[in-house]
Amino acid sequence: MPDPDVATIDRRRFLQSVTGVLTGVLGALGPLAAVVPGRAWALELHALSNEQAATALAVVRSIAPHDGLDPAAYALVVGALDADAAASSDTRGLIVGALDGLGAQFATLPEAARVEPLRAIESGAFFQSVRLKTLLVLYNNPLAWEHFGYEGEAFSKGGYLLRGFNDLKWLPEVPLAASGPLPMT
């Protein structure tokens, strides 16, 4: 017989309360998790505010738009920008000033509306540094590689020759004589 002094709670109410608490905790720990839908991920910010990080995420997505690319790949770029801003006060001033100049509403604008403000600053130091950081970080991580079908470097896996590089089944077989004369060496 259950003890009448102990409060009982059914499983459904317990799970609802735990889910609410966990959602609040994860939301507080990962500010960008609420901005970007998709897989669960969190980004710890050191120099940028939540609004600045959301604006930076929108800038990065506008510089390198790829439908279907995991949002966490873009978050890695924002994390690198945040680390740069935390490491140097000059860099922080450049990044924070430009992000604040674009405004918090920039992150909520549709893609087409974000292009014009970015064109206006594309020759500046902020845009060029974000563009370079996007190229270096976004395209150098396994999340993006998976999206684009790149399997990574091949040396550690035995090279390209035995991994499909020489597998040209989609080309017709051409006789060697049709290739023409071999060059003289």
Image: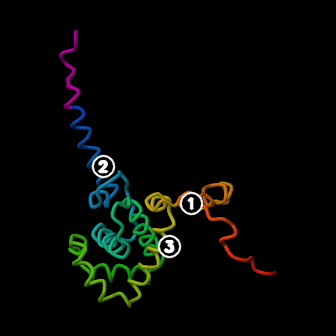
Sequence-first tag of 1 and 2:
2
Residue 6 in percent (x, y) is at 22, 21
Q: Which residue is mark 2?
A: 25
Note whether 73 is above or below 25 in the view shown.
below
Sequence-first tag of 3 and 2:
2
Looking at the rendering, the stretch of residues picked out in magenta corresponds to: 1-13
Residue 159 in percent (x, y) is at 67, 59
Q: Secondary structure at mark 1?
A: loop
Q: Main secondary structure of the magenta part?
A: loop
Disc 3 residue type?
Leu
Note whether 180 is above or below 32 in the view shown.
below
Q: Which residue is mark 1?
A: 152
- The disc at residue 136 is 3
Left or right: 184, with 157 as reference point? right
Q: Residue at x 39, y 60 (%)?
A: 44
Left or right: 160, with 148 as reference point? right
Q: Secondary structure at mark 2?
A: helix
Sequence-first tag of 1 and 3:
3
Residue 183 in percent (x, y) is at 75, 80
Q: Residue furthest right?
A: 185
Q: Residue at x 27, y 69 (%)?
A: 51
